[in-house]
Amino acid sequence: MATDSTRSLRPRPRTHSSGFRVALTAVVTLAATSPAQAAWTMHGGNAQHTAVTTVPTQPLQAIRWQAPVDLQPQYSGTILFIHYGSPLITEGNTVIFPVKVGVADTFRVEARAALDGSTKWTLDTDYLLPPHSWVPSVGLAMTPRGRLYVPAAGGTLLWTDALEDPGAHTSTRVAFFGDAAYAANKSAMDASLRVCTPLTSASDGTVFFGVRAVTTNPLGITSGIAAVDASGNGRFVSMFDASGGLCDRVSLNCAPALSRDEQTLYIAGRGASSSPGYLVALATSDLGTRHVRALVDPKTASESFVSDNGTAAPMVAPDDKVYYGVLENPFGTNAVRGWMLQFDADLVPAGVPGAFGWDHTPSLVPASAVPAYAGPSSYLLMCKYNFYVGWGDGTNKLAILDPGTSQLDAFSGVNVMQEVYTILGTTPDPDAGPAYPNAVKEWCINTAVVDPFKHSVLAGAEDGRLYRWDLDTNTFSESITLTPGLGEAYTPTVAGPDGQVYAINNATLFAVGATNVGVRPVAHVRDAPRVFAEPNPAAGAATLRFVLPSEANATLEVLDLAGRRVASVWSGTRTAGEHRVRWDGRDANGRECAPGLYVVRLTAGGRVASARLLRIR
């Protein structure tokens, strides 16, 4: 068993009980929710964390506005040892993000208009961080019907809605172990339980998250996985029980991922030490264990590290494969690159690893977004490919990888995912020294954005720039300077429903897009087209209900999560108002579509709206 040698890790020369199941129910009265559909709802954009935008992104021409995400950033020299939570964007184009207010704790949520960054509302939370080295991310989530959930004290959540509406917002607290039990033991539960992962929402509004118990509490709740549904009903399983006693806590920053049919939840666990680590598959209905998989180093066959300083979360692909990044063991045997492991839906190893993995969530790249690719896979992976100075030679890259084919890795000698493309960072690293003449600044990514419309990836680097990686030419076709750059924790990049791009650098959120020339003004949600799918989930046919603010030519399409068109449902001209179209659940070839999550996209009058539809058996 290894000690937690990664507790203060960042791989650069500058820094080297018995559980039980809670089945208590908390019932709350729900207020009417906003009809807005979220465009980027959680870590990685959706419950599978694929990070694929459903609209084309704007050119990286101008910083439209900026706002702090940390009012008291704690620098260590020129380094920020922190992970910032992902911004979320509603379909009505309100940008919602967590803000660190105090030195060590104290957080609030801000909602701003995407057009100009003006503040629409703020909401305080009493959330306290779990014990940490690098500051963990504070991860929010929105449900498909526009309810926002925020981590709060004592393992509880706060929710609010009417997210597009400016003015004061109130919140309602919900505890997975029962609101009355929380009220009766508030101080003890606040001292004991901490939400320790970003939140993940299912299509029915159920929110899943990890909890750590830092002390004992009157209810005997230990570290584990919790869920709260839209009516306030809670469920919980300890990680000890979920793993069959193999580990006892959820990894920090590990956002739960859901299978495409939302019947299975994937999350990583570990013990007090970062090794051994495990990937666990649970039934979403009752959090019962389906599968447990030891995370094994593919070179040494040792137990891989699952570091609390990383930001790895599972990603579920369209073929139901699960990808999760780990750190190698012994430490440094793969140049502190770790491995990107791949499994089938039952967590059976299902292919060669990627040569980097431990500190990010891979992004899904439809094969059609890489025109030169002629291999067998329907999708590829985008991964950062840092080769840190001191362990490697500092040639920090991005990579497009084929999980279905392999090549020999020159450093490790292990068969790894085939490199379709790699691209080197552009900014030399003067701190690397003369022994590393080709060293460049590293990529600060925990999630990137894949734009299948423009065949590109959007990602930020430590040099303070946001880049567009053009997959037609394997070049950086666009970039924009956000800050002078500094060493910092990896941060998310996200995209809004108007194609505006959001990136964090030096404790600041930047909204980046085209110059005003030729750009359509962003409409308020009430003046924009909207689309809904009913019923949702749907076992057979579904009614696609859409609302047009004025007469327009419109098209309705169904896409898979890789952005590929599944069916063209309808096109024509309709007057202002509400309209309904039936989709029979079949693809363009007349085959019934498999269970899973799909995107319904409405294009009308040059504007795009989308909704997610879950198909079940």
Image (cartoon, rainbow, N blue to C red):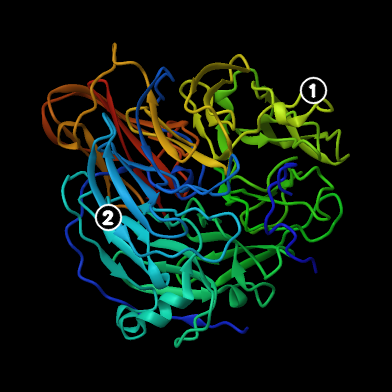
| Direction from residue 472 to residue 348 in the image, left or right | right
Say which residue label 1 marks.
Answer: 437
- Height in image: 258 above or below 598? below
The CA distance from mark 2 to mark 1 is 48 Å
Observer-nearest residue: 137 or 408?
A: 137
Residue 426, by quadrant, is top right
Amino acid type, residue under disc 1 in the picture: Pro
207 w.r.t. 451: above or below: below
Write the residue at 61% across / 58% down: 133
Q: Residue at x 47, y 59 (%)?
A: 104
Q: Residue 421 appears at what percent x and percent y?
A: 68, 24
Name the quarter where the C terminus is drawn: bottom left
* Quadrant of the rendered image containing residue 552: top left
Q: Nearer the viewer, residue 19 or 110?
A: 110
Q: Front-most of 226 and 190? A: 190
Q: Is residue 240 left or right of residue 42?
A: right
Q: Of the residues under marks 2 and 1, which one precedes in the sequence?
A: 2
Q: Residues within 10 Å of mark 2 (few under 14, many from 20)?
A: some
Q: Residue beneath label 2, please?
A: 123
Q: Which-is-in-front pick, marks 2 and 1?
A: 1
Amino acid carrying mark 2 in the image: Leu
Q: Is residue 165 above or below residue 154?
A: above
Q: Position of residue 260 (x, y in %)?
A: 49, 50
Residue 210 relative to residue 308: left or right? left
Which residue appears at 44% of the width and 62% of the height? 208
